[in-house]
Image (cartoon, rainbow, N blue to C red):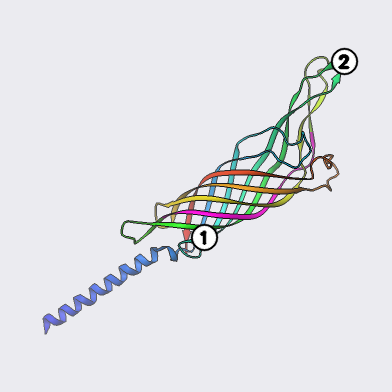
């Protein structure tokens, strides 16, 4: 009888231990981590803005820093919904010919076209995820996501024009237009993205994302100092952010 009671007691203890372990594993299983916040940093580049008057879109662009904050909700291990706010500077570059002065043809000078400083995007993303687990399928350690995005874009700008001195013969004091600022803009964007996230711990991970987005923006024409109304009223272009970041997930 004593041996039976001892065996029963050991069985109860073992069962309780197994249940506790099972609960601990379940707490680490992905469905319990419904929310995820992150910060991304990287670089992006734009195409030249199309739809503006010739000569106001430049002939080249530069790679610029790109920042974003995002909040993610995991409906299940395969479907993720993200709200993302990003910021970067958009600018293109070209050359303008200066007129004759005192019978001399002046050389062409570089000019910059400031599109937005900053250009702010607010996107909603829907991603389909392929989850990866640890060896014995007890823990969720990474995922590969493919998705689409859509949202709003605002560009901060004042519609002004900047001048520089020519600093050369025949008149070194001659001033020419060296920068053109588009007006304040608002529009929409849509695109697609691919990302990979790896979790070093249950909650903390790193991510890498590449994306392509199309934007269409209308320029505010109520600004009295914006003399570009006839040249820049609406434009569209592509931009390509490539970022890495950190992620923290919670219930």
Q: Which mark is residue 29?
A: none
Q: Label 1: which residue?
A: 80
Work out which residue is located at the far right of the displayed protein and give it: 102
Q: Secondary structure at mark 2?
A: loop
Magenta segment boundaries in residue numbering: 142-161
The percent position of residue 8, horizontal first and vertical second, equals 18, 80
Residue 133 within the magenta-colored segment of the rendering: no
The answer for how far apart the CA atoms under marks 1 and 2 are is 66 Å
Q: Residue at x 67, y 40 (%)?
A: 90
Residue at 42% x, 62% y is 30
Residue 42 percent across, percent down from the top left? 55, 42
Q: Are marks 1 and 2 in contact (CB under 8 Å)?
A: no
Which residue, given by chain and number where applicable, does mark 2 sit on?
103
Tell me the element at label 1.
strand
Instruction: Please identify the quadrant where the N terminus is shown.
Output: bottom left
The quadrant in which residue 161 appears is top right
The outermost residue toward the bottom is: 1
Determine crowd level at label 2: few under 14, some 14-19, many 20+ residues with C-alpha closer than 10 A.
few
Q: Nearer the viewer, residue 3 or 131?
A: 131
Front residue of 210/23: it is: 210
Query: Of helix, strand and loop, which mostly describes the magenta segment?
Result: strand
Image point (72%, 38%), residue name: 114
Residue 99: give x, y in percent of width and height.
84, 23
């Amino acid at each position: 009888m004593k041996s039976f009671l001892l065996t029963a007691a050991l069985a109860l203890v073992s069962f309780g231990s197994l249940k506790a372990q099972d609960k601990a594993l379940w707490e680490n299983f992905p469905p319990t981590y419904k929310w995820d916040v992150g910060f991304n940093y990287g670089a992006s580049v734009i195409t030249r803005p199309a739809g503006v008057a010739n000569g106001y879109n430049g002939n080249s662009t530069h790679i610029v820093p790109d920042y974003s904050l995002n909040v993610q909700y995991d409906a299940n291990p395969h479907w993720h919904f993200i709200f993302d706010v990003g910021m970067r500077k958009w600018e293109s570059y070209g050359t303008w010919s200066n007129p004759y002065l005192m019978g001399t043809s002046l050389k062409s000078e570089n000019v910059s076209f400031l599109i937005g400083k900053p250009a702010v995007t607010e996107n909603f993303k829907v991603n389909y995820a392929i989850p990866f687990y640890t060896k014995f399928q007890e823990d969720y350690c990474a995922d590969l996501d493919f998705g689409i995005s859509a949202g709003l874009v605002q560009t901060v700008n004042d519609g002004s024009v900047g001048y520089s001195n020519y600093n050369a013969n025949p008149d070194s004091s001659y001033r020419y237009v060296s920068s053109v600022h588009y007006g304040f803009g608002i529009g929409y964007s849509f695109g697609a993205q691919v990302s990979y996230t790896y979790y070093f711990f249950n909650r903390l991970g790193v991510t890498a994302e590449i994306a392509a987005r199309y934007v269409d923006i209308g320029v505010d024409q109520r600004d009295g100092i914006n003399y570009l109304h006839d040249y820049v009223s609406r434009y569209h272009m592509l931009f390509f952010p490539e970022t890495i970041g950190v992620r923290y997930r919670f219930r």
